[in-house]
Image: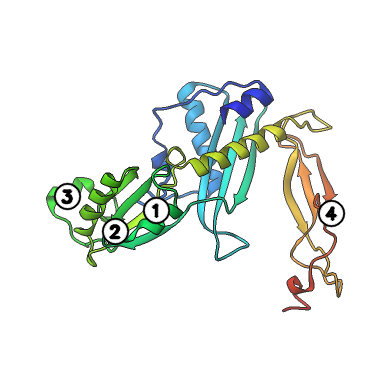
Amino acid sequence: MALPFSAGLGLKLACAEEIDTDRLGTFTGEVERRGSPRETVAAKARLGMEALGLPLGLASEGSFGPHPVLLFVPGTEELMVFIDDELGIEVCERLVSTETNYASVSAASIDNLQGFLRQVKFPSHALIVRANRPQSVASAGESAALNQNGAGKILKGLRSIEQLEKAIQQCQAQSEDGLALVQTDMRAHMNPTRMRLIRKLAVKLTRRLQKLCELCQCPGWGLTGVEPGLPCGLCGFPSDAARFEIYSCPRCDHEAKLPRQDGLTHVDPGACQRCNP
């Protein structure tokens, strides 16, 4: 994130390294993310601003699961927010991609994981191991290693065969079915693929902050919404697809409704609610 903001805006990034962002939620579920991704990324930025005593803040937040359009393909959504309390603005950009190694598998041994390990780019990308079916009752000696839901140890940041093999053995012992659940570690510092997406999103956000509102000259003019109704190419019935894009200023009320940037003027009849209900 530092290079795009330095080259594009002349801003130097300072990291608030002592902040525990896990309190806002974890990918592994031991701390539930209570707010929306948009609320969480803003909360992260403000934690940094408070810790460093700065009026500007920057943070990112990722979500992983089925792609919103390609439902059987793993997808990732990255959000990045820039806050300027001097101008009173919050500017958020979003990137949705299939460029992710997000995956998981249940295993009894490391011996049958070779294909999975190649798929998820191990060991350059770290892994997480936990019990596949956590035992409901833990001994008192293990209590310090349990998450708040009593689901057993969660071993993160595994980047060697030796670490992975030991973790599988430990978590098998805590699982009712004798299996360990091996998952990709989606924390950014453990996942170079995600780092590349964050860099792309930082470039996108920087370019937006370079654009000024034509009325108040505030930075951050950009796409903030869409208006549905793109007509079907066969029957002309309005679809749920975006017909116009809404651009607005993060500070004043100025906005503009513009045609889609991709030039699309009709949807395929296969996506029409009338032609293909």
Local packing at callout 4 (Cα closer than 10 Å; few below 14, some 14-19, many 20+) is few
Q: In the rendered image of this protein, does residue 66 appear above or below residue 272?
A: above
Residue at which label 1 appears = 117
Tag shown at residue 263: 4
Q: In front of the other: label 3 or label 4?
A: 4
- Give the crowd class for mark 1: few <14, some 14-19, many >=20 residues within 10 Å: some
Q: Which residue is mark 2?
A: 111
Q: Earlier in the sequence, mark 3 or mark 1?
A: 1
Percent position of residue 48, x then y: 48, 29
Q: CA distance from mark 4 to mark 1?
A: 41 Å
Q: Circle 3 is placed at which residue position?
A: 142
**Residue type at mark 2?**
Asp
Q: What secondary structure is found at the residue carrying circle 4?
A: loop
Q: Residue at (75%, 62%) from the top-left corner?
A: 241
Which numbered disc, 4 or 1, marks the residue closer to the eye?
1
Asked if disc 3 and disc 4 are in contact, CB closer than 8 Å, the reply is no
Name which residue type carries label 3.
Answer: Glu
Relative to the observer, which residue lies in front, 184 or 255?
A: 184
